[in-house]
Image (spheres, rainbow, N blue to C red):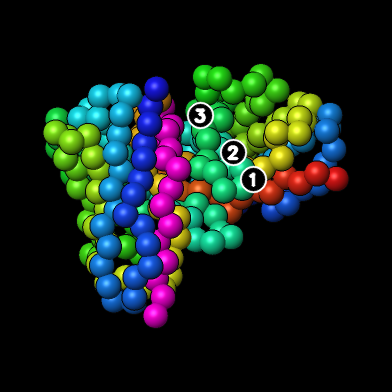
Amino acid sequence: EVQLVESGGGLVKPGGSLRLSCAASGFTFSNAWMSWVRQAPGKGLEWVGRIKSKTDGGTTDYAAPVKGRFTISRDDSKNTLYLQMNSLKTEDTAVYYCTTEEYSSSWVLDYWGQGTLVTVSS
Amino acid sequence: AIQLTQSPSSLSASVGDRVTITCRASQGISSALAWYQQKPGKAPKLLIYDASSLESGVPSRFSGSGSGTDFTLTISSLQPEDFATYYCQQFNSYPPMYTFGQGTKLEIK
């Protein structure tokens, strides 16, 4: 059974930093392309960024609002995905989900963790 | 970037009703559209991919159709557990990014 468990959320002041983790199990993590998606309170879903598998280059892509501030990385030896968030703004307040990606005729987000809440407030 | 517009934004219906939610893309995307269901306090769940393919384990009362710019999600006979928010999603190849519709909240009448 695929399991994704996020951790690391909490309260942080504007301008601060936070690192989220996502522990994966039930599938071959090293082969997986992974994404982070966030949801501000009472709002819709917003894609944050992705990381490809190392065999596919291990490169990352980011949404415009977080590019240059957020960094996605992975440790395949620990089956763990990370989201390093720097220069946090109040508008980054959201539940952050890690997801697996699957390709059929296009990309979809097929498994989701339960999410971790990040609150940016003074 | 391609934008997705869902309609309606909210919908009231009764158990047993047939319900249709629409998603319109700002430009043609062939059949590259997915649908998700999200219940309050829970993570989204993939329902349909490639516009009409049912994800494993999803009840057959859910169906998707469409291609190009206009897509629909249909629930043939609403069950109590179907009251949730539904999102459509597509993937832009360049720049690489996932885009979601704004969501449709399905409520009990």
Residue under mark 3: which chain is it in?
B
- Label 2 CA crowd tier, 10 Å (few <14, some 14–19, many 20+): many
Q: Nearer the viewer, residue B25 or B20?
A: B20
Q: Quadrant of residue A108?
A: top left
Residue under mark 1: which chain is it in?
B
Q: Nearer the viewer, mark 1 or mark 3?
A: 1
Is B15 a magenta residue?
A: no
Q: In the image, what residue type sits under mark 2? A: Gln
Q: Nearer the viewer, residue A97 or B12?
A: A97
Q: Nearer the viewer, residue A118 or B8?
A: A118
**Sequence-first tag of 1 and 3:** 3
Across and down, in percent, residue A53 comes to 20, 34
- Label 3 CA crowd tier, 10 Å (few <14, some 14–19, many 20+): many
Across and down, in percent, residue A48 comes to 36, 54
**Which residue does the numbered mark 2 point to in the structure image?**
B37
Is A116 a magenta residue?
A: yes
**Which residue does the numbered mark 3 point to in the structure image?**
B49
Q: CA distance from mark 3 to mark 2?
A: 12 Å
Residue contact between numbered discs 1 and 2, judged by CB atoms under 8 Å: yes
**Which residue does the numbered mark 1 point to in the structure image?**
B85
**Can the viewer see residue B28 in this picture?**
no
**Can the viewer see residue A116 in this picture?**
yes
Q: In the image, what residue type sits under mark 1? A: Thr
Judged from the image, the secondary structure of the residue bearing numbered disc 1 is strand
